[in-house]
Image: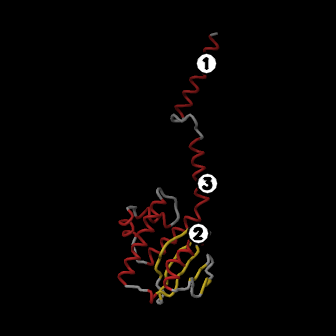
Amino acid sequence: MNEIILENQIEEIEQITHYVTNKGNLFPFKDEYKEQMKREYIAENQQEWIKRGNIFKELREKLNITKAEMERATGFSSSTISKFEQGQPIMNAEKLEKSYSLYLENYQLKQIQTKRVDDSTIAHVQIKQYGKDLYIINLITTSDIEIHISDEDSMQWALDIAKTKFALPMNLPIIFITDDGEEVTLRNKISQ
């Protein structure tokens, strides 16, 4: 009987020792599993993040907006903005992307008001494809100035916006630019 009690005590001591040596983690492999899942998630999404980050960076630089201005506008640090533009994983990426996009759109609207761009200076509506689910709508002026309108995740939605808000009311052609740079005029002049 003493041997059974002794065996139970030894087993109990081993469990306590195991618990203490694993810093209270009863499942020592749980953290490793989380890290593996995190690495796999990053690997699956890295290319898309890089592509999106590059698009935002190009727009920011094209508009001559500094990272410091973007930092003030979004509330995110310059280093976080740099990571986002490089496609690195960051906390609150969706929130930063929305803030960033909103600031770019507002900035461009202010430019339009300042430059007094009117219907007669707009040459066409442009839809640029980036990857399989990002379509950027721009207005292109006769002097080749791009005015960013919106980012959409569906070609049909982008086409509907381009057609109903700009091509029809302003009697403009829509030019679609594929992911590999090929230009396709969807309609010379859109009619109802």
Q: Earlier in the sequence, mark 3 or mark 1?
A: 1
Q: Foreground mark, 3 or 1?
A: 3
Is residue 2 shown above or below 177?
above
Furthest-top residue in view? 1
Q: Earlier in the sequence, mark 3 or mark 2?
A: 3
Percent position (x, y) of residue 133? 59, 68
Percent position (x, y) of residue 102? 43, 68
Percent position (x, y) of residue 12? 58, 22
Q: Nearer the viewer, residue 65 or 105?
A: 105
For label 1, the residue is 8
Residue at 60% x, 85% y is 187
> Could you tell me the amino acid type at mark 2?
Ser
For label 3, the residue is 40
Look at the image and tell me in which quarter the C terminus lies: bottom right
For label 2, the residue is 154
Residue 37: image tag: none
> Could you tell me the amino acid type at mark 3?
Glu
Mark 3–mark 1 distance (CA, rounded to whole Å): 42 Å
Mark 3–mark 2 distance (CA, rounded to whole Å): 26 Å
Q: Nearer the viewer, residue 49 or 148?
A: 148
Mark 2–mark 1 distance (CA, rounded to whole Å): 64 Å
Q: Foreground mark, 2 or 1?
A: 2
Please tell me in which quadrant of the rendered image residue 106 appears.
bottom left
Q: Foreground mark, 3 or 2?
A: 2
Q: Earlier in the sequence, mark 2 or mark 1?
A: 1
Is residue 89 shown above or below 9?
below
Look at the image and tell me in which quarter the N terminus lies: top right
Q: Secondary structure at mark 3?
A: helix
Q: Secondary structure at mark 1?
A: helix
Please tell me in which quadrant of the rendered image residue 63 appears.
bottom left
Residue at 52% x, 59% y is 89
